[in-house]
Image (cartoon, rainbow, N blue to C red):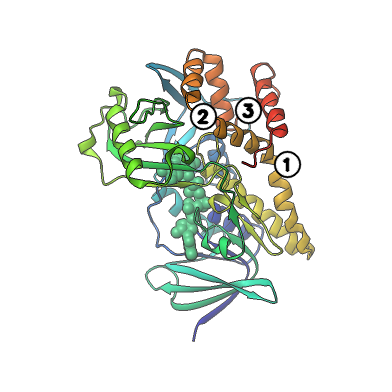
Amino acid sequence: MSMRLSTEVLVIGAGPAGSAAAHWAAQAGHMVVVLEKETMPRERVCGDALTPKAVGHLHDMGLGAICDEFHQHNGLRMTAHGRSIELRWPTDHDHPSHGLVIRRSTLDHLLLEHATTTGAQVWTGVEVLDPIIEHGHLRGCRAFGSGNGTGPQGEIEVRARFVVIADGPLSSFGRALGTARTRTYAQGVAMRGYFPSIHHDDDVIESVFDLRDNTGEQLPGYGWVFPVGDGTVNAGVGLLSHHHGNDPRSMRELFDQWIGQIPEYWGIASEDMESEPKGGRLPMGASVRPRSGPNWVVVGDAAGSVNPFNGDGIEPALSNGRLAATVISDAIHSGDGLELRQYEKQLVSKYDHYYRLGRLVTKALGRPGLMRRLTLLGIQSRVLTELVMRISTNLVNNDAGGTESVYEIGKVIARLVPDRD
Ligand SMILES: Cc1cc2nc3c(=O)[nH]c(=O)nc-3n(C[C@H](O)[C@H](O)[C@H](O)COP(=O)(O)OP(=O)(O)OC[C@H]3O[C@@H](n4cnc5c(N)ncnc54)[C@H](O)[C@@H]3O)c2cc1C
């Protein structure tokens, strides 16, 4: 006999996307149940860097004070071809002018506890197995609890009016409802490890654009060193998949090669790595469709929301989660399920041109030699590097004019160029 439960909003998965959705829906006064298969705190493979925009979301959620306890970064150092340019995060925006580096085991636990405090019922150690579909309509899910987390043990059935699908890059629940990734869009693949470093508490993060394959050709991707402030740095490498393919061995080779090439400044030794490096996929550029149905919405990695310019997925996850909760809350209040169409509409109006441009850029970067030419050009000019930094972190100030009109031109080109293949 399975345990049964009913709720207004069911959230599947408790990464940043699911916890943000749960927080905002509970804050709006709705009954929310979150199911997470892992027990918290759990590890999540990531570079652990939050952009200023992501920090803005944490402040909006009421986590501003606790943010002060984590390691801040005030800028980005871009390095290529033996040159570096260091830039501060822009201040002409309505969110903080610093980012954070927080280990994901800590961040995700914090976000989920916050959702609990706001009023969501959270069951960890409960794996969602499949959707309950009746008369073609999603009614909830069947799940199984290990009994090791906050959830019960055994078979569980949760019925819900609305479902938020936040189950990460593989999104088996989304796939069961018919979501699919557009395979012609580039996907990111990345690997990271932790290393002790004398510069673990530097206030800049570093991205290095000098990744090479065995033939010496420059690859479309970058290596990073993100100071965590706890004695370690998170160092990793990320690449566009059309160049890398799906071979985990070659990713490990590339990672090892990159660790040997990290600027000496950081004082990193490969033998000091905290534990084996881990890798994962980054579904980017709004590559998953559909992103909503009559009573469900898909958020974060499950929706392919990672920023195609830089692999930043935490900010889009937090943003998607908030938008999902808002449209669901509107639908509950108005009694009109059609409100959920607003989710897709608002995603398109907010991000479509940006992601289209990103897809165009990632596609172009697959061309041999282009990455080298662009980085050689970019690293000569502070103005160009700053433009790249603003665009890649989606901190473009449209009022600024000047160089940022380049971005506007890019968006127009992206609109005109087909990006289906
Ligand atoms: C190597 C690497 C480095 C990265 N670096 C950065 C970075 O520095 N900054 C950045 O912003 N982004 C980075 N990203 C991307 C970022 O990690 C993701 O975009 C982000 O985690 C997406 O959040 P999410 O909530 O959508 O999904 P996830 O964080 O993947 O959370 C999904 C949750 O759903 C749960 N779940 C899955 N299936 C089920 C199920 N059946 N039942 C119940 N629960 C389930 C999972 O256990 C998980 O907790 C990186 C990614 C990788 C791979």
| Residue 383 horizontal/vertical position (percent) | 56, 15
User: Mark 1–mark 3 contact, CB under 8 Å?
Assistant: no
**Is label 1 in a helix, a strand or a loop?**
helix
User: Mark 2–mark 3 contact, CB under 8 Å?
Assistant: no
Three-letter amino acid code at the position of disc 2: Arg
Mark 2 against mark 3, which lies toward the viewer?
2
Q: Of the residues under marks 2 and 3, which one precedes in the sequence?
A: 2
Give me the C-alpha separation between circle 1 and circle 3. 16 Å
Q: Which residue is mark 1?
A: 349
Three-letter amino acid code at the position of disc 3: Val
Number of on-image labels:
3
Residue 396 badge: 3
Residue 14 badge: none
Q: Residues within 10 Å of mark 3 (few under 14, many from 20)?
A: many
Give me the C-alpha separation between circle 1 and circle 2. 30 Å
Q: Which of the two residues, 74 or 220, is positioned nearer the viewer here?
A: 220
Q: Which residue is mark 2?
A: 367
Mark 1 against mark 2, which lies toward the viewer?
2
| Residue 262 horizontal/vertical position (percent) | 31, 27
Mark 1 against mark 3, which lies toward the viewer?
1
Q: Residues within 10 Å of mark 2 (few under 14, many from 20)?
A: few
Determine whether 8 is above or below 187 in the image: below
**Residue projecting furthest to the bottom:** 1
Disc 1 Cβ-to-ligand 1 distance below 8 Å: no
User: Mark 1–mark 2 contact, CB under 8 Å?
Assistant: no
Three-letter amino acid code at the position of disc 1: Ser
